[in-house]
Image: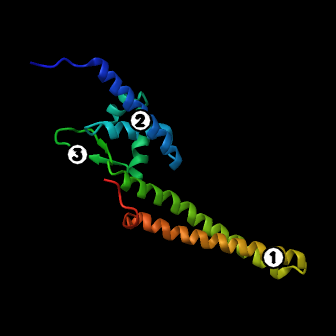
Amino acid sequence: MTAEKDEKNWEKHEAIIEKFIQIIAKNMNLYGITPSIGRLYGVLYFNDEPMTLDDMRDALSMSKTSMSTGVRTLADMKMVESRFRKGIRKDLYQSEEDWYKSFTSLFGTRWRKQTETNIEEAEETIEILEEMYNKTEDEELKERITQDLEKLDYAKNYYQWLIQFIKVVESGEIFNYIPKNK
């Protein structure tokens, strides 16, 4: 005997998953990912099979160009992988299901770039202030520059520590200290 399809609960299930996909999209905004790309990831994550750009477009009612851009962004962050299936000519994509791997890749990429920029800016500011210090006769300004150089040195040390932390995250060594939940 074949069981009837429980339409009411299928609709409820779909609504619940859609709600969670919205939460994924919202949270990914914390990492600089647009909500539409976050929704794309959510749809790929909950889809049991790899999807084509056409499949994604139909699921999200977005343009194929937007889907392509979103997939490329997610692939760059190692959150989506290209898949091959014999007999299918279109590109297929599937989400990376290891969120720990995705996070470490995304975190490392985003934070490393910003932190390296902050180190460079601190070094440039230190150089300019040291030059000013050496050229001025104003003792009050020299005192202020000295205080600012101490603060900049502290900031630079912090950013260098952050680079070490980023390396621990990127390498996966972080999981020796904070194991993945099973």
Residue 20 image label: 2
Q: Amino acid at mark 1?
A: Met
Left/right of residue 128 with respect to residue 40 in the rendered view: right
- Indicate which disc, 2 or 3, sits on the residue closer to the N terminus: 2
The kind of residue tagged 2 is Phe
From the viewer's perspective, tell me whether residue 173 is left or right of residue 91.
right
Mark 1, other Cα within 10 Å: few <14 / some 14–19 / many ≥20: some
Say left or right for 120 vs 30: right
Residue 81, percent across and down?
32, 48
Q: Measuring 25% from the left and 19% from the top, which residue is drawn there?
A: 6
Under circle 1, the secondary element is helix
Secondary structure under the numbered disc 3 in the rendered image: loop
Q: Nearer the viewer, mark 2 or mark 3?
A: 2
- Residue at 30% from the left image edge and 43% from the top image edge: 94
Up-down relation of residue 156 to residue 114 (above or below): below
Q: Is residue 80 above or below residue 52?
A: below
Q: State the SS at label 2.
A: helix
Visible in this render: residue 166?
Answer: yes
Q: Which residue is mark 1?
A: 132
**Label 3: which residue?**
84
User: Which three-letter amino acid code belongs to the residue tagged 3?
Assistant: Phe
> Vertically, is 159 above or below 89?
below
The Cα atoms of the two marked residues, 1 and 3, are separated by 61 Å
Label located before the other in sequence (1 or 2) = 2
